[in-house]
Amino acid sequence: MSSDLNAFITEATVEGSADGPLAGRTVAVKDNISTEGVRTTCGSAMLEEYVPPYDATVVERLTAAGATIVGKTNMDEFGMGSTTETSHFGPAENPAAPGRVPGGSSGGSAAAVAAGEADLALGSDTGGSIRNPAAFCGVVGLKPTYGLVSRYGLVAYANSLEGIGPIAPSVEEAAELLDVVAGPDPHDATTQQDDGRDVGPTGDADFASAADGDVEGTTVGVPRELVEGADEGVVARFEDALDDLRDRGAETTDVSLPSVERCVEAYYVIAMSEASSNLARFDGVRYGVSGGYEGNWNESFARSREAGFGEEVKRRVLLGTYALSAGYHEKYYAKAQDARAWLQQDVDEALSEADVLASPTMPVPPFERGESLDDPLQLYLADANTVPANLANLPAISVPAGETDGLPVGIQFIGPAFGEASVIRVGSALA
Amino acid sequence: MSDPVVDGEEVRHVAELARVDLDDEEVDRFAAQFADILSYFDSLDEVPEVDREADLANVMRADEERDSLSQEEALANAPETVDGYFKGPRVS
């Protein structure tokens, strides 16, 4: 296996069962998903030596399905970034665009699949962390509906937004991996339970059969707010992909989503607030970098976190603490929750007029390495098209849509809750 | 609403609440960045009030004994342990 790309933080071989739907396939697993006996760093110095004593549910399901796990992939620290450059273990390369970032935060997973270092990969997506690197590396990435895939064993960053999903060379292969990991889990009470309460999964998913490319009669809604302002070359590839779908019998129609204009700020307020709470567990006592025994526990914890966290993680923990603090909670956190509810109404309405919504996955082609590190706000703004699906808890897929100046472009399809089959079907018409 | 004023003192205060030590350079950099980012977040003021319909249901399980980590497994990642316990810093 080549390690030139720095796609893996830890290479390891975990053999799966002899047979099963993924027998003979290799799978790379993002390094924030717990693997028993194989260190799980989250791309952080804090967890450089952390070895989980148990497997995430998705890892148990992978090996039971016959997959061989080939390693733990590089990522932005704790999932906080969109370039894989905030990793304590150094940036990963983009095999589809040398010198450019692979996207993030699941950049190692997308790079490993794009370079053939693994047949398939698991990533996690809190605000685009599966779809962004899939688009930048020219592969397929799917963020499932919130509650379709168990998060048990996923190291928490922003629980109300994040989920685990597949990255693969084709839509059909992504759907095959989703079939294996989807379904209720007694260890994650937010997975949709099979109790007749809703339309959630039953544990014997068959998403792969939806990858038939048949879009005859499908209505694709295009929220123009997510197309305007995107890079010209990206828009050209996006429009080509829509032409392709129309040639195959789909209809396209413009829809309006005024609430998306406030999504990036709502997303970051919620994600940072949840992060500041979730990352409070890192005190250097039960795991992580010890802050020593000088002074009192506050001093020790503050030293542990200074040494163990990188700059982006500190930035988000501090901003989240600020947004939740007395006097600012109503101004930031409560308004962000309003924005989230507003978006959910908007999207429900748009999806009553269309089967899926389409946009460029990323408004820009892959950044040059180092280009975006000095201005965090500019980098956050590039998440405009991916964060709505997280805020609305909806499934979304990124599918390759050609290149602009030799750089990969992705098209995103968003579907209704537990409508993975519809985004898989439309996506499979293109890849 | 006016732009929030973020100075070094405020960054240090939040860092103390969050239990993160910062060096002087980080404090300066964060003060400038936080002013930018928070003034961008101010646009949330334009969001209309929305009825939040929470469609939530409790998920319960039977209160039955089940396997858990052994003491040894639970302690395996601790930087220091004493007599089968985590070793923590002084409380005060």
Image: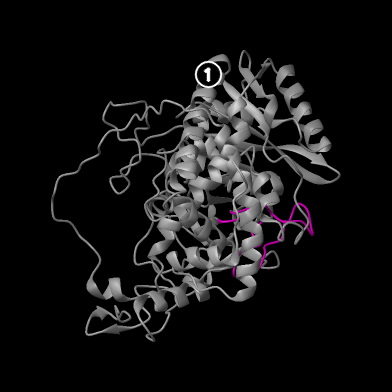
Q: Is residue A33 above or below residue A382?
A: below
Residue at point 52% right, 52% down?
A24
In the rendered image, residue B14, in percent from the top left (x then y), is placed at 49, 63
Instruction: Inspect the magenta stretch and tell me whether residue A342 lies in it.
Output: no
Residue at point 77% right, 27% down?
A239
Q: Amino acid at mark 1?
A: Glu
Q: Which residue is mark 1?
A: A349
Looking at the rendered image, the quarter that the C terminus of chain A falls into is top right
In the rendered image, residue B68, in percent from the top left (x then y), is placed at 22, 62
Q: Is residue A171 left or right of residue A29?
A: right
- The span picked out in magenta is A80-105
Q: Is residue A75 above or below residue A266?
A: below
Instruction: Inspect the magenta stretch and tell me whether residue A95 lies in it.
Output: yes
Residue at point 62% right, 53% down?
A104
From the viewer's side, name the closer residue of B7 and A144. Answer: B7
Looking at the rendered image, the quarter that the N terminus of chain A falls into is bottom right
**Observer able to see residue A117:** no
